[in-house]
Amino acid sequence: MRPTDLLRISSRQVLRQYRKNIGVIITIIMGTAGLIIMLTMGKSIEENISNDLEIIGNATRLRIIFKHISTTRHPIDKREFKLKTIDGIKAIRGVDQVSGTVVKNGYVKLTYKNNISHFQMLGVDESFWKVHGSSAQWGTLLSTKDLQQHRTVCVLGQRAAQEIFNNLDPTGKFITIDNTLFQVAGVLDTISMPDKARYIFLPATTARDRINSVTPVNKLYIRCHSWDDVEHVMAEIPAVVKTYQPDDAIEMFLPEEILARVKAISFGVKMVVKLALIATFVLGGIGIWNIMMMAVRSRTREIGLKKAIGAEDYDILFQFLTESLMLSISATLIGFLLGWMGVTFTASILQNQPPKDLFWLSTAIGFSFSLMLGIVAGLAPAIKASKMEVVTALRYE
């Protein structure tokens, strides 16, 4: 039998039996689509969860400071993380963001109309918000331009905004901080940093210019891409600091209990997803095997007639094996389309571009699974059909 005839006959047979095959087809479609989405967007989903959920964000955020030294001889600690040190930490594999902060010793005096209040002040850079997974409740957060141009703008913590403006949107209003006029750019949400709800945030460059008694950059916050990168990053940081600041010793802080819990949850979720995908393909394979065995039984006389008019055993074997492959591959092709739609939709939610290289890799893996599934599930029924005796098959009722 010619290959083209074999494909035509097998395709026609699969189409004729589509009602019987619908359950298996849907199972393979969902398994293929799930595999593609998991392999293509798994890393992006993990990073997005890490950025957006505070409990996981804490698990991927490190804080480093200088080790405490006696202040008897040096009443003011002037140690500072150098720009080369910060750039070196940024270059470590697995590091997403690095943010340095400056603080005022004591409180700043804030004046609005005739009201005077005192708040803690924090000078931050543009990466500070990404490190902490922060967003604005009102207005906007401080930007790169605000730092580069030393703008006199500020962001208020939510409690500070409530005390000054009585729950009204303060965006665009002017306040005086330590005798300097600042414009309110926005109000920080309360989810990411509840302990800083009563802080005033200024651009670090502006804070150094306008505010007295501001410390140098002696504290760094580091955000890793995911919780799997944390241990590697922690191991690399001391060597980087030692390279550029050999006389300075540091301490690192990490919520280890939260990290352990997050890793356990992540492992559990990944295992459940993988087992679900494996179960889907196994059920699809069992379904194909069952369908093909039923086909062999229902077409016993057909097999006998074909053998009677000259069909060889391998012709029958290839016909049933091709039908099994056509059933598996046709469902897989639909699964590819559904998987691409799922990847595109997931990428739009995460606001990034779907990684096409991972998509094509997952497609190749899915297609390989499909071929293996069709062959393994259809081989036994095909062998059984090819081994039938002509006389027995013709007399089958």
Image: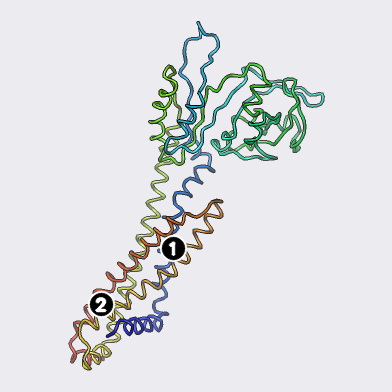
Q: Quadrant of residue 212 in the image?
A: top right
Which quadrant of the figure has residue 236?
A: top left
Residue corresponding to mark 2: 381
Q: Amino acid at mark 1?
A: Ala
Cα separation, mark 1 vs mark 2, equals: 27 Å
In this rendered view, identify the residue nearer to me: 261 or 230: 230
Name the residue rendered at 42%, 60% in the picture: 360
Mark earlier in primary sequence (1, 2): 1
Q: Of helix, strand and loop, which one carries label 1?
A: helix
150 or 280, which is in the foreground?
150
Q: Position of residue 341 (x, y in %)?
A: 51, 63
Name which residue lies at 24% across and 83% down. 315
Q: Residues within 10 Å of mark 2 (few under 14, many from 20)?
A: many
- Where, quadrant-wise, is the N terminus in this rendering? bottom left
Q: Which numbered dot is residue 33? A: 1
Q: Residue furthest right?
A: 114
